[in-house]
Amino acid sequence: MIHYSLRQLRYFITAAELKSTSAAARQLHISQPSVSTAIRQLEESFGQALALRQRGSGITPTPYGRMIMRKGRHLLELADNLHDPLGGIPSGSVLIGCFIDISPYYLPAILQQLHRKHPEIQPSIVHGELDGIPLLLKRGEVDIAITYGVLLDDELRHETLRETTPHALLAADHPLATADSLTLERLLQEPFILSDTPYSSEFLLTVLASRGLEPRVAWNAGTFELLRGMVANGLGVSMAYTQPRCSKSYDGHELVYRPISDPLPSQKIVLVRHRDARLTPATQAVWDTIRADRVWQDTPVQPTLP
């Protein structure tokens, strides 16, 4: 016999997502004690703690609580869609994780398509680093995610959206910018700007070391846009798998991408979900929209050089 209600599940999931019973109460337009009571009743029903409570730090779901969140979202969405037994109008919330470096270049167009095709779906975005996205999926903190196809394992299922190869980044007025392509040896003679983001720098340095090469690191950049801005302002050159469709840095300086002639490993941009996560009508609609979006086929813009 079921000893819990959908209302209790909704209160708990909302509080866990917001990491606060008070914030959940405001969003749900109920009292804070009602949220706390619902969580306590759920814990009594399941016989396990669902959340850790810390004064001044809100709540954090336990591993068991994260499992309940993942399965509970699916149950709530099925209940929300009972008014449409044929499943013709997917609705509900979907949490989309995305690797922070690529989200500015792909997510806006995807969200626009989702709003046009499925206005009843409410997507929410959760950003993460390369090593954080798999954890978000395993903890049930996102439903699906867009990231590079690294650090994935058997707990996750994925589909390839796009395959990319590393390119050289140079200021538009750099002497090497007119070349059709560049060798690694020639590129690495220049001062190099290295990404500081987790895993990215280690991966790049490992690839270069396997070819007996090491960059002359002049600067480190904590974000991809900072790296692009440094390159565009002539502080050095760099390499990246992400190739935006804009040829300007945030401060308006031009930069160019040039192919590297040396054979280098490619990377896949992938759409990922947990292997045990069942796609609800809303999640399936979001999955299909992302997979079919033309953003994965568009060619990056390059400036016209004199």
Image (tube, helix red, strand yellow):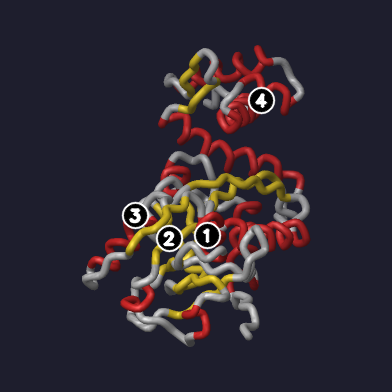
Q: In percent of the image, x 39 and y 58: which residue is there? A: 218
Q: Residues within 10 Å of mark 2 (few under 14, many from 20)?
A: many
Give the CA separation, mark 4 to mark 1: 41 Å
Q: In percent of the image, x 62 and y 62: which residue is there? A: 249
Which circle marks residue 230 in the picture? 1
Which is more toward the observer, 143 or 181?
Answer: 181
Give the CA separation, mark 4 to mark 3: 33 Å
Q: Give, as a three-letter code, the residue at label 1.
A: Met
Instruction: Give SS at disc 3.
Output: loop
The vertical placement of 223 against 110, above or below, is above
Determine whether label 3 and label 1 are within 8 Å by CB.
no
Q: Earlier in the sequence, mark 1 or mark 2?
A: 2
Which is more toward the observer, 161 or 185?
Answer: 185
Is residue 207 shown left or right of residue 68? left
Instruction: Give SS at disc 2.
Output: strand
Q: Earlier in the sequence, mark 3 or mark 2?
A: 3
Q: Earlier in the sequence, mark 2 or mark 4?
A: 4
Is residue 156 shown left or right of residue 56? left
Give the CA separation, mark 3 to mark 2: 31 Å
Q: Mark 2 or mark 4: which is in front?
A: 2
Q: What residue did someone put label 3 on?
A: 153
Q: Mark 3 or mark 1: which is in front?
A: 1
Q: Is residue 239 visible?
A: yes
Q: Earlier in the sequence, mark 3 or mark 1?
A: 3
Image location of residue 128, percent across then percent down:
50, 46
Q: Earlier in the sequence, mark 4 or mark 1?
A: 4
Which circle marks residue 24 in the picture? 4
Q: What residue did someone put label 2 on?
A: 193
Which is more toward the observer, 261 or 42?
Answer: 261
The vertical placement of 3 against 240, above or below, is above
The vertical placement of 191 against 70, above or below, is below
